[in-house]
């Protein structure tokens, strides 16, 4: 009978650590929910359907090409160098965290730091 309290005492730190780990990881929302999250900071995981790069702006359209994209990631010239060859992101799945704003009634996240954008590993397809 003395083993049960001892076991609980030994397991309690691991249970607490696991709960803390879950708190640190942000909830990932689908890109289609971004339009209802304007003003909030969210984390989205989605496929880059289109990359549009000019001298003044880079736009990464998620889930579909313009004008049917669910969310646009925007990079301004001051931050171009942080993101390297963005054209290579087309077709890749990315995880992005940032504040959702709206431009011409479309949701967007402006990327100020490369830390906001992570390319996700390709998942093996089941045969």
Image (spheres, grey):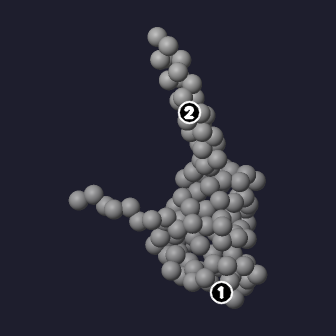
Q: Which comes before the other along the chain, label 1 or label 2?
A: 2
Is residue 8 visible to the viewer in this orientation of the structure? yes
Query: How far apart are labels 1 and 2 at the CA level?
Result: 50 Å
Is residue 57 visible to the viewer in this orientation of the structure? no
Q: Nearer the viewer, residue 69 or 95?
A: 95
66 vs 56: above or below: above
Q: Which mark is residue 54?
A: 1
Residue 39 % position (x, y): 76, 53
State the quadrant of the C terminus: bottom left
Q: Based on the displayed image, in which of its 4 quarters is residue 123 positioned?
A: bottom left
Q: Nearer the viewer, mark 1 or mark 2?
A: 2
Q: Among all residues in the image, which is located at the extreme bottom? A: 55
Q: Nearer the viewer, residue 67 or 115?
A: 115
Query: Residue at the location (50% across, 13% down)?
Result: 2
Q: Name the residue that disc number 2 marks.
A: 15
Residue 31 % position (x, y): 57, 57
Query: Residue at the location (72% across, 79% down)?
Result: 79
Q: Is residue 106 shown left or right of residue 11? A: right
Q: Nearer the viewer, residue 126 or 37?
A: 126
Query: Which secondary structure, mark 1?
Result: loop
């Amino acid at each position: 009978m003395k083993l049960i309290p001892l076991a609980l005492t030994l397991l309690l730190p691991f249970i607490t650590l696991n709960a803390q780990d879950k708190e640190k990881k942000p909830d990932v929302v689908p890109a289609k929910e971004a339009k209802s999250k304007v003003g909030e900071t969210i984390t989205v995981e989605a496929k880059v359907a289109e990359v549009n790069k000019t001298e003044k702006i880079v736009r990464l359209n998620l889930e579909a090409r313009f004008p049917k994209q669910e969310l646009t990631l925007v990079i301004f010239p001051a931050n171009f160098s942080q993101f390297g060859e963005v054209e290579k992101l087309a077709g890749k799945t990315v995880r992005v965290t940032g504040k959702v704003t709206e431009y011409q009634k479309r949701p967007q996240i402006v990327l100020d730091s490369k830390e906001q954008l992570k390319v996700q590993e390709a998942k093996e397809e089941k045969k």
